[in-house]
């Protein structure tokens, strides 16, 4: 069995329009859950990787839904219930096909009150990898301290650290985030970033992807993956650059696609697969996520991926 993964971050409730429309006009909304780290956990679980998610939730219906859906997807959950703060909320609308507008209500959320004390129940030796993002340290000083301590304990335990920059400009500016991102990257084994995020980390232009990957690697990580969306992705490992083109799909919603990519890439990495295989699965899982309006609901299992190999759209 593949060794397990621990993801740490904020779980949130999601309210989204059913189809094309805005919150100004829609009368009904679909209810779901999200959060980058939880999305990655679900993606890993669907690909057969043992995974645990750690985060705080409010003593409310959305908090219950977050933990219930994670558990239903086969994810282990460590979720202290915070009676003094609500579960964060994301509103998502689709004003036109393939375009999403996202608004967050997460100031003072339970997830933002994550602290190093929440890590006391974790045995970091039990995991092969700890995955974090740049979202959690943006939420509060205590959440930032939690991620810092988690990385420290992972490294002490000999557990690999995966970091997806996932910059959110509505949470903090690039200038405010830069030192934190660079410090996390320095202590990570693998860093995921979009071209714009790698440019933020390195100060280089976005259009020189090989230079971005090399400069990001110079910060400390042994493995760097640059996510390029519709242009695919590249990985730098052992001074060798590997690229993979994107798969063309009818895009419904790109929210969560980056998390699906990370899950696919990490799942193959944990299996000891080649970089080519890691990129291949990441691209395929990311493409599948784009074809569904939910944050994680469209993430594929390995059986789902096997079914897409044939040309017949009907399974008989």
Image: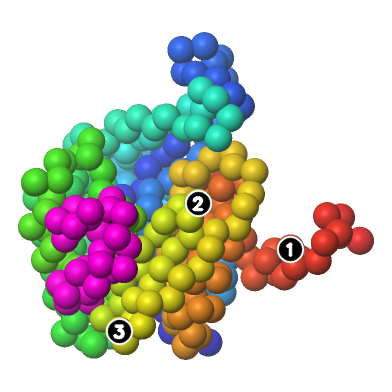
Q: 29 or 81, which lies in front?
A: 29
Where residue 205 sits: x, y (%)?
23, 53
Cα–Cα gap, marks 3 and 2: 25 Å
Judging from the image, what secondary structure is the residue with disc 1 in? loop
Evaluate if marks 3 and 1 touch, with contact meaning CB atoms under 8 Å apart: no
Question: Can see residue 278?
Answer: yes
Distance CA(mark 3)–CA(mark 1): 33 Å
- Residue at left offset 74%, top offset 63%: 308
Q: How far apart are marks 2 and 1 (CA)?
A: 19 Å
Q: Which residue is drawn at 56% across and 48% down?
A: 290
> Which residues are drawn in magenta?
196-221
**Which is nearer the N-term, disc 3 or disc 2?**
2
Dot 2 lies on which element?
A: helix
Characterize the magenta stretch by its predominant secondary structure. helix
Q: Does the magenta stretch include residue 154?
A: no
N-term mark: 3 or 1: 3
Q: Which residue position is annotated with label 2?
A: 230
Q: List the residue tagged with mark 1.
A: 308
Q: Could you tell me if the residues under marks 3 and 2 are in contact, i.e. CB atoms within 8 Å? A: no
Q: Badge 3 local density, few (<14 within 10 Å), some, or many (20+)?
A: few
Q: Residue at x 86, y 59 (%)?
A: 312
Residue 243 in the figure: left or right of residue 299: left
Q: Which mark is residue 239?
A: 3
Kindly report which numbered mark, 3 or 1, lies closer to the viewer in this rendering.
Answer: 3
Whether 13 is drawn above or below 275: the answer is above
Task: Indicate the quadrant where residue 26 lies.
Answer: top right
Residue at x-position 47% and y-position 32%: 100
């Amino acid at each position: 069995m593949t060794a397990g993964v621990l993801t740490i971050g904020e779980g949130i409730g999601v309210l989204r329009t059913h189809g094309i429309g805005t919150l100004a006009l829609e009368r009904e909304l679909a209810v779901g859950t999200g959060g980058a780290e939880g999305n990655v956990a679900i993606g890993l679980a669907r690909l057969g990787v043992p995974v645990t998610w750690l985060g705080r939730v409010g003593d409310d219906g959305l908090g219950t839904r977050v933990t219930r859906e994670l558990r239903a997807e086969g994810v282990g959950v460590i979720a202290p219930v915070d009676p003094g703060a609500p579960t964060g909320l994301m509103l998502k609308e689709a004003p036109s096909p393939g375009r999403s507008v996202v608004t967050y209500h997460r100031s003072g959320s339970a997830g933002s009150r994550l602290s190093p004390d929440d890590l006391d129940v974790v045995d970091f030796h039990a995991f092969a990898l700890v995955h974090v993002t740049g979202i959690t340290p943006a939420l509060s000083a205590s959440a930032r301290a939690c991620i810092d301590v988690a990385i420290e304990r992972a490294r002490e335990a000999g557990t690999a650290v995966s970091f997806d920059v996932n910059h959110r400009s509505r949470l903090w500016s690039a200038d405010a985030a830069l030192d934190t991102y660079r410090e996390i990257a320095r202590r990570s084994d693998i860093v995921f970033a979009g071209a714009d995020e790698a440019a933020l980390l390195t100060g280089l232009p976005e259009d020189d992807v090989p230079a971005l990957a090399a400069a990001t690697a110079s910060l400390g990580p042994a493995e760097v993956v640059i996510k390029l969306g519709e242009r695919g992705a590249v990985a730098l490992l052992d001074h060798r650059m590997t690229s993979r083109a994107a798969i063309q799909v009818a895009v419904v919603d790109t929210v969560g696609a980056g998390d699906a990519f990370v899950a696919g890439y990490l799942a193959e990495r944990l299996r000891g697969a080649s970089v080519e295989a890691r990129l291949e699965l990441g691209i395929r899982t990311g493409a599948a996520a784009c074809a569904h309006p939910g944050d994680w609901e469209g993430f594929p299992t390995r059986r789902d991926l096997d079914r897409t190999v044939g040309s017949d759209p009907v399974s008989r």
